[in-house]
Image (spheres, rainbow, N blue to C red):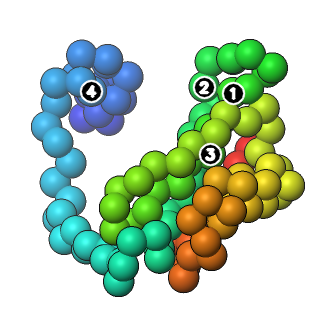
Amino acid sequence: MHQDAIDLVRKCDKCQRNGNISRRPSQPLTSITAPWPLAQWGMDFVGPLPMATSQRKFLIVAVDYFTKWVEAEPLATITEKNTESFVWKSIICRFGVPRTIVSDNGKRV
């Protein structure tokens, strides 16, 4: 009976939305500091999003850690060529070669 109650709560939408928050210990936040403007960029992909013109449903985003300046571009597909092109024309050609680019190296499906 106890297991049935657990299963019911796991499947109940209202129970999931209004239930207690996980009791795991919180992890302290760590700041990422950059030595000067445009030296360190963070990059990631967003999506899939609702389809836009030219079948674009992903977004590549780069943020400078010092100034918080954002560069973004919509993409139809996530490929190495698209990523290289974005870094070249949106970061290197406009602001110079950054000291580091931080990425989570996430796998896209």
Residue kind at label 2, given as amino acid type: Leu
Residue 97 x, y percent position in the rendering: 62, 76
What is the total number of numbered labels drawn onto the structure image?
4
Picture layout, residue 94 above or below residue 6 = below
How far apart are the alpha carbons under marks 4 and 2? Answer: 25 Å
Q: Which of marks 1 and 4 is in front?
A: 1
Q: Which of marks 3 and 2 is in front?
A: 3
Residue beneath disc 1: 57
How far apart are the alpha carbons under marks 3 and 2? Answer: 12 Å
Residue kind at label 3, given as amino acid type: Ile
Disc with the residue nearer the chain's start (3 vs 2): 2
**In the shown orientation, is residue 92 left or right of residue 5?**
right
Residue beneath disc 4: 16
How far apart are the alpha carbons under marks 1 and 4? Answer: 30 Å
Residue 76 x, y percent position in the rendering: 78, 32
Disc with the residue nearer the chain's start (1 vs 2): 2
Whether pointer 1 and pointer 2 mark residues with C-beta atoms closer than 8 Å, the reply is: yes
Residue kind at label 1, given as amino acid type: Lys
Residue at image position (25%, 74%) is: 30
Residue kind at label 4, given as amino acid type: Gln
User: SS for tag 4?
Assistant: helix
Residue beneath disc 2: 49
The quarter of the displayed image where residue 101 is located:
bottom right
